[in-house]
Amino acid sequence: MSNTQKTAVVLGAGITGMTVAWKLSEAGYKVHVIEKTDKVGGMAGSFSYKDMVLDYGPHKVYTQLPGILDVYKEIVGEDLLRIKKKNSLRLLGRYFDFPVKIFQVMLGLGIGTALKCGLGYGFTLLKSFFSKKKLISYEDYFLAGFGKPAYNLLFRDYAWKVWGDPKSLSEELARKRIPVPNIFELVKGTLGIKPKTEVSAEYFYYPKKGIGNISEILAERLLKNHGEIHFHTVPEQIYVENGKVTHLVVSDIEKKSQKTLKTDIVVSTIYVTELPALLQPAAPQTVLDAAMRLHFRAMIIVYVVVKKPKLMEDNWLFFPEQTFIFNRIAEHKSFSNELVPADKTVLTAEVTCTPDDEIWKMPEKELYAQVVQDLTKAGILNPSDIEECFSKRMKKVYPIYAIGFKDHLMTILDHLQGVSNLLTLGRQGLFNYNNTDHCIDMALKAAEHIIGHHSPEEWMEKIRYFDAYKIVD
């Protein structure tokens, strides 16, 4: 190895971290990846359970970003499956296509509901003609575009289940997650007219061996390029001198030992809320306070192993109503037949909650019983066919876009901009509600930024670009 070889430290071995680590190692950097768990992939990872390979919830590969699908194909090769997508939403005892086809829903729920929603939207239009209200909250966004009856029916309860009180959530969340601004755009889709914003894909892609296979392949490539992955390891301190990181102190959790890593660049994909506290000298109190004001929602994924070859026609189903404990279920076999034995199948039920709330504290047996009861109520399975249930818990999954969150985030990012060789990116690293294609795009642009020796100001321009990502189901 040349004495002039540059070194990079990547914090986090999720799909963002592994992509940027791979690209930097290809460019000749000596790369150290710091990962607190024992495997790569993060939340877009897979794990082995008995005779199965399972993901942390349903993941798909779909993108509208230029060149990103080619990157997936280059990584996974022939094992990247192309799948016809089908997903639905359950409402008032019936199943409807998702994304919502407004005429299908209105006809399915009856003329009374249709009239109520139509009159509600008409009243909203009339009100807006006389006084234009500034859209501040998630609720404002959908009330303005759909009227109160349709908002209550389609959007309100789902927000409560996944993110919390829709009155306290920023309208930016509504635009990012459900970018159909009004009922007219939904009608266009129903009539076959292409809406301004595409919200659904007809097909998606998926790695035959599980979503985690992407990061596993990248890890193999990194190791071939003489990079290193330090598992069970966490950053303790990041030392900064004259606006540049000089070295880090990291701890091996298992060996209870520390070591120092000198570096030319640090790429962080860990939670941006935790990054400022690692800096030495310490970040200003205003930055630390801003980090404490950004929050995440937790998730419990309940895996239900069923003694049936297959259960659903859909890849996944949405359950917006509060009467169901889960907000979405998916079937692994609808993504790849190779993950689960032929004579059984696995459902994943996503239960979103707040850390330490009633659901989070619920005993496992009670939680499983509630999930099974609701799956039975939905007509998905017969309890007698269940082989077992188990779960995975994650305390920080969904960034909560509370009103005013952007000010707190920018306080942190503005401070980090003063450290020229420290980049933060990814879902956790930018508090960005994104998908795996966005993570790969961020990573590629970060690698280009580093290799091209671009300025911190140019990185802030990239962050503004990342902020414009839209979620396409």
Image (cartoon, rainbow, N blue to C red):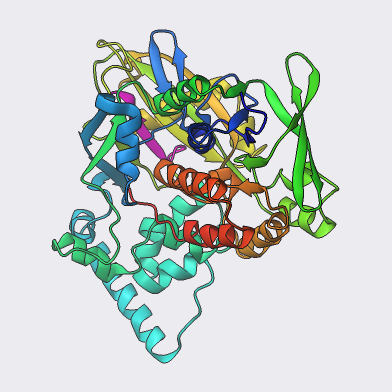
Residue 7 on image: x %, y %: 65, 34
Q: From which residue to which does the magenta span run?
A: 323-334
Q: Is residue 353 visible?
A: yes
Quadrant of residue 183 within the rendered picture: bottom left
Residue 116 on image: x %, y %: 29, 69
Residue 120 on image: x %, y %: 34, 73
Considering every residue shown, the one lying at the far bottom of the view is: 130
> Against 261, is 157 above or below?
below
Image point 49% across, 29% down: which residue? 301
Quadrant of residue 337 within the rendered picture: top left
In front here: 27 or 66? 27
- Quadrant assignment for the N terminus: top right
Q: Is residue 187 magenta?
A: no
Horizontal side, residue 56 vs residue 263: left or right: left
Considering every residue shown, the one lying at the far top of the view is: 50
In front here: 6 or 143? 6
Q: Is residue 380 visible?
A: no
Image point 60% across, 29% down: which residue? 30
Image point 41% across, 25% down: which residue? 372
Q: Is residue 332 magenta?
A: yes
In front here: 213 or 202? 213
Residue 269 on image: x %, y %: 59, 40
